Amino acid sequence: MIDIDAILDQLDPEVINIQVLMKHDVARERYQPVSLQCADGREFQEAVTRYVRHHQQAVGEGTPSEDAARDTATGILDRAFSDDPFQEGYTVAEQLAVDGRLHEVLNELHAGLRGRAQGAYLKGVFLRHIDPLSRSDHLELSRAFYERFRTVFERAGIVLDEQSFMGNTRALFEYYRQVLDSIYSRGRRAWGRP
């Protein structure tokens, strides 16, 4: 039987913030690079590798090998700075660092590592409660969400049925998390908190 209350508790923005995100923010704040400018590609590669190793060790994910840290940094930077289809994102990030803007690169690495951790947490919540291959688990989860939030959807004028809910329960998790984040941030603004 699926415990909808346990799932909703684990998707609470405060819980995610405390269990996952704050560690990543502290890791970024505590890291001070030797210099905010890199002389060349080799120095840049060492700087981003050093940051990824520091970050993952600081959040308790262990210390990756230099090759693994470099591959992680390359993947994140390729996605983060991929605005130009004719130039790799890693190359754009390297140019920023050579121009003295390494802090922007490190901020993107932080955001990428933080996002990966949040995604892993949400996937873990999903897998703790749902057998991904069980149609009955997906149906039970979608029914529980549907029953819990039917009045909210009806008030908003959204017409849904159980079958449309069951189509993708993982997307349902993400949608619910986004709704909670929105409500939470609006409430904090209304109460005058940052």
Image: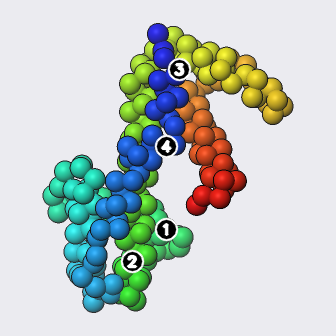
Label 1 vs label 3: CA separation? 39 Å
Label 1 vs label 4: CA separation? 32 Å
Q: Residues within 10 Å of mark 4 (few under 14, many from 20)?
A: some
- Kindly check if marks 1 and 2 are in contact, taking CB atoms under 8 A apart as contact: no
107 lies above or below 132: below
Q: Residues within 10 Å of mark 1 (few under 14, many from 20)?
A: some
Amino acid beneath label 4 = Glu
Of mark 2 and mark 3, the one earlier in the sequence is 3
Q: Which mark is residue 14?
A: 4
Q: Mark 2 points at which residue?
A: 103
Q: Mark 1 points at which residue?
A: 82
Q: What residue is drawn where x is 43% and y is 75%? A: 104
Q: Considering the numbered disc 4 on the image, is that residue within a helix, a strand or a loop?
A: helix
Residue 63, picture quadrant = bottom left
Numbered-mark total: 4
Could you tell whether 71 is left or right of 15 in the image? left
Q: Residues within 10 Å of mark 2 (few under 14, many from 20)?
A: some
Q: Mark 3 points at which residue?
A: 4
Q: Nearer the viewer, residue 185 or 118?
A: 185
Amino acid beneath label 2 = His
Q: What residue is drawn where x is 28% and y is 53%? A: 59
Q: Which of marks 1 and 2 is in front?
A: 2
Of mark 1 and mark 2, the one earlier in the sequence is 1
Q: Considering the numbered disc 3 on the image, is that residue within a helix, a strand or a loop?
A: helix
- Kindly check if marks 1 and 3 are in contact, taking CB atoms under 8 A apart as contact: no
Of mark 4 and mark 2, the one earlier in the sequence is 4
Q: Which of marks 1 and 3 is in front?
A: 3
Amino acid beneath label 1 = Ser
Label 3 vs label 4: CA separation? 18 Å
Q: Nearer the viewer, residue 95 or 181?
A: 181
The x and y percentages for residue 12 are 51, 37
Residue, far front: 191
